[in-house]
């Protein structure tokens, strides 16, 4: 008897992917629920001031849905607190003994996320695109978790956070579309900025660079 007749590998793959999808959704929702009650007002005000200086978005515009979402995801994954840590690090430290093993394993991928540029090569539908990071990445298919790709076409440059979930790449949080006229100039600027940082801190990886400075490049965003 053929092994393939006994084991349906496609079915196993599908089941593993479904588990990964549920795990990621649960981790995301649990973490953002944690943020609502765990970050104090003073820290949040400090973060808003920093976001303003990095991106140039006035406080009143942070109530605009898309800028509000960008701020909240930067606060969640990239912002460094007064104590010198990120909120996601704090969440995992505090709940490491309560979270199920699949969530802890998934969290290791979220630690690696950066706000990175993606050049769109194909838009399959509102929830699935194909693209690559022009700096270091190969082409891949990226699916959305909660925020559809409604305003982009082939050739656009966007910024987003993505993570591995099972067998696929998943976009976490909203994306930001860059003005078409600024796309090439922006990529040259990022390369130049990275070289400057590497002169100060040799061997800085692209991911470490984007983790700290990726938010700065939303200055080139189309009006949200």
Image (cartoon, rainbow, N blue to C red):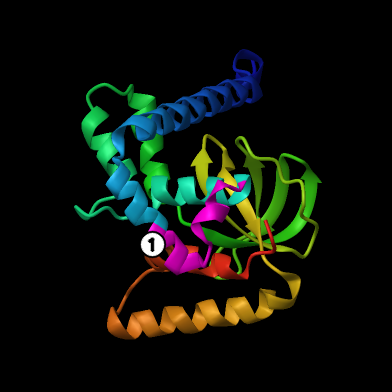
x%, y% of residue 4?
64, 21
Lateral position of residue 35 relative to residue 180, left or right? left
Q: What crowding class fits label 1: few (fewer than 14 Cα within 10 Å), some (14-19), or many (20 or more)?
A: few
Left or right: 1, with 195 as reference point = right
Residue 60 inside the magenta-drawn segment: yes
Disc 1: which residue: 50
Residue at point 43% right, 68% down? 53
Location of the N terminus (image quadrant): top right
Magenta span: chief secondary structure: helix
Rendering quarter of residue 98 = top left
Residue 96 image offset from top left, x and y in percent: 25, 29
**Where does residue 71 sit, x and y in percent of width and height?**
49, 51
User: Residue 170 vs residue 47: left or right?
Assistant: right
For the record, the magenta segment spans: 49-64
> Is 195 covered by the magenta stretch?
no
Q: Residue at x 33, y 55 (%)?
A: 46
As rendered, which of 214 and 70 lies closer to the eye?
70
Dot 1 falls on a residue whose secondary structure is helix
Quadrant in which the C terminus appears: bottom right
Q: Nearer the viewer, residue 143 or 65?
A: 65
Does residue 161 appear in the picture of this structure?
Answer: no
Against 151, residue 181 (above or below) is below
Above or below, 105 against 162 in this view is above
Horizontal side of residue 152 vs 131, given as left or right: right
Work out whether residue 87 can be spotted: yes
Residue drawn 45% across the image and 81% down it: 193
């Amino acid at each position: 008897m053929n092994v393939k007749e006994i084991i349906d590998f496609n079915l196993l793959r599908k089941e593993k992917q479904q588990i990964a999808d549920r795990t990621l959704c649960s981790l995301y929702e649990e973490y953002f629920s944690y943020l609502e009650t765990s970050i104090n007002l003073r820290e949040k005000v400090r973060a808003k001031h920093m976001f303003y200086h990095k991106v140039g978005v006035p406080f009143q515009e942070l109530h605009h849905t898309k800028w509000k979402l960008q701020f909240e995801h930067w606060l969640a994954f990239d912002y460094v607190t007064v104590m010198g840590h990120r909120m996601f690090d704090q969440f995992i430290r505090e709940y490491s003994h309560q979270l199920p093993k699949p969530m802890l394993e998934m969290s290791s991928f979220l630690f690696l996320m950066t706000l990175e540029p993606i050049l769109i090569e194909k838009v399959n539908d509102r929830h699935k695109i194909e693209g690559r990071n022009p700096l270091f990445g190969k082409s891949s298919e990226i699916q959305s978790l909660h925020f559809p790709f409604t305003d982009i076409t082939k050739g656009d440059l966007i910024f987003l956070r993505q993570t591995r979930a099972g067998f696929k790449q998943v976009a976490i949080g909203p994306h930001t579309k860059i003005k078409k006229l600024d796309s090439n100039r922006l990529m040259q600027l990022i390369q130049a900025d990275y070289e400057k940082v590497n002169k100060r801190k040799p061997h800085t990886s692209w991911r470490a660079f984007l983790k700290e400075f990726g938010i700065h490049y939303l200055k080139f965003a189309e009006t949200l």
